[in-house]
Image (cartoon, grey):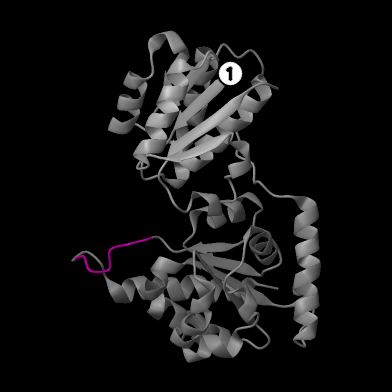
C-alpha cells in the first residue's frame, strides 16, 4: 500500500502535528508492506521535534515539477494500492488528486487542518481507511533517548572544559529563536539582559535555528552587551535537536518564538515565554505596553526560578 500525504504548500505547525499523528496511525494499522510519500514545500519542516524524514519513502516539494510528475506516472502505472490523504486544503491537492487515476486509488481522504479539532479529523480518517483499533491522538517527539543521553554527556564535558558546572547545576535561561526573526527582538533581548544582569549567577544560553554556522560570531556581536555578559556556551548558537532537547530540559525556563519548542515545553511542564510574531508597524501596536508586558513576564519567571 502506498500512502500519499499532501500538506499545505506553506506548512503550519498545526499541520506538522496532525501529520505526526496520521503517520503514527498508519504505522499501527499497516504493520508492514507500506510506503508513505509526502508532498509539501516547507524547507524547515525537518527541524521540528515532531517530524522525522526517515518515516517517509519519498519526500517531494510541490515546486519540483519534474519530481511530482515522475511520481504521478509511477502511481498511475504501478499495481500497488494507493490511498491519498489530502490535508492541504489547496489547489495543488485538487490537481494531484485529479491526476491520479481513479482505478489506482483505494481511498481518498480530504481533511482540513486544525490541530485543536484533530479528534474529528482522525475519526473521519479511521472510517475512510476502515481502521478498527484505537487511534493514537497525541503527537510524539522523534527523539532517541540514547542519543539524547550521549549528547548530554558531551554537553557536560564541554561545560567542564570551559570551567562551568555540569548543565543541570547551572542556573540558566534558554533562549531559542528563529534566525530570520532575530533582528525583530532587539528591545526584548535588552530587557532580558538587563534583568539577568541584576540576578547573580543567572546565565543565558542562546540558540538560533536555521542559522549558518559561519554567522555565529556576527550574531554574538549584535547582541546587547548585558546579554553577552551572561552568555555561556557559544557552541550552542547553532545546534541540532538532541542538544535542544537537553538545553530545554535542564533550563530554568525557556524564551522562544519556535512553536515546536513552545509545544514541547508545555508538554513537559517547562515554564516558557513564547514570542508571538506580531506586526510592530501596525497602528494598533502599542510598543510601551508590549515591552512592559514582556518585562513583567520575564521578571516573574526569573523571580520564581530556583
Q: Where does the image place residue 236, in percent across and percent down from the top left?
A: 62, 73
Q: What segment carries the magenta color?
A: 277-282
Q: Where 242 sits versus 235, above or below?
A: above
In the image: residue 155, left or right of residue 56: right
Q: Residue at x 54, y 73 (%)?
A: 213
Q: Residue at x 77, y 56 (%)?
A: 147
Q: Where does the image place residue 126, in percent across and percent down from the top left?
A: 55, 17
Q: Where does the image place residue 74, in percent across and percent down from the top left?
A: 47, 23
Total labels: the figure holds 1
Q: Where 34 sits versus 216, above or below?
A: above
Crowd tier of the residue under label 1, counting other residues whose Cα lies within 10 Å: few below 14, some 14–19, many 20 or above: some
Specify whether residue 299 is in view.
yes
Q: Is mark 1 on a helix, strand or loop?
A: loop
Question: Is-magenta flag for residue 208?
Answer: no
Q: Magenta segment, principal secondary structure?
A: loop
In the picture, the quarter occupied by the N terminus is top right
Q: Mark 1 highlights which residue?
A: 1
The quarter holding residue 98 reads: top left
In the picture, the quarter occupied by the C terminus is bottom right
The quarter holding residue 60 reads: top left
Q: Residue at x 53, y 24 (%)?
A: 3
Specify whether residue 90 is in view.
no
Amino acid at each position: 500500500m502506498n500512502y500519499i500525504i499532501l500538506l499545505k504548500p506553506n506548512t503550519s505547525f498545526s499541520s506538522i502535528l496532525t501529520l505526526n499523528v496520521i503517520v503514527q496511525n498508519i504505522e499501527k494499522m499497516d504493520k508492514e508492506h507500506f510506503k508513505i510519500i509526502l508532498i509539501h514545500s516547507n524547507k524547515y519542516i525537518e527541524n521540528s521535534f515532531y517530524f522525522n524524514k526517515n518515516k517517509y519513502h519519498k519526500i517531494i516539494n510541490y515546486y519540483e515539477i519534474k519530481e511530482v510528475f515522475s511520481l504521478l506516472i509511477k502511481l498511475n502505472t504501478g499495481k500497488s494500492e494507493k490511498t491519498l490523504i489530502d490535508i492541504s486544503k489547496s489547489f495543488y491537492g485538487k490537481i494531484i488528486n485529479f491526476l491520479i487515476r481513479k482505478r489506482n486509488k483505494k481511498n481518498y481522504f480530504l481533511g482540513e487542518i486544525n490541530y485543536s479539532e484533530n479528534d474529528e479529523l482522525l475519526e473521519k480518517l479511521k472510517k475512510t481507511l476502515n481502521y478498527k483499533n484505537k487511534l493514537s491522538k497525541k503527537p510524539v517527539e522523534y527523539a532517541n533517548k540514547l542519543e539524547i543521553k550521549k549528547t548530554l554527556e558531551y554537553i557536560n564535558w564541554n561545560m567542564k572544559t570551559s570551567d562551568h558546572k555540569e548543565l543541570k547545576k547551572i542556573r540558566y535561561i534558554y533562549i531559542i529563536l528563529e534566525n530570520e526573526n532575530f533582528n525583530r527582538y532587539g528591545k526584548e533581548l535588552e530587557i532580558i539582559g538587563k534583568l539577568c544582569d541584576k540576578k547573580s549567577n543567572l546565565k543565558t544560553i542562546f540558540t538560533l535555528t536555521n542559522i549558518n554556522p559561519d554567522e555565529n560570531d556576527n550574531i554574538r556581536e549584535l547582541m546587547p552587551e548585558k546579554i553577552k555578559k551572561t552568555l555561556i556556551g557559544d557552541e550552542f548558537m547553532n545546534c541540532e535537536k538532541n542538544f535542544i532537547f537537553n538545553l530545554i530540559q535542564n533550563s530554568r525556563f525557556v524564551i522562544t518564538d519556535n512553536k515546536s519548542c513552545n509545544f514541547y515545553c508545555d508538554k513537559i511542564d517547562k515554564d516558557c515565554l513564547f514570542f508571538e510574531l506580531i506586526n510592530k508597524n501596525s497602528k494598533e501596536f502599542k510598543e510601551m505596553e508590549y515591552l512592559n508586558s514582556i518585562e513583567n513576564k520575564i521578571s516573574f519567571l526569573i523571580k520564581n526560578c530556583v
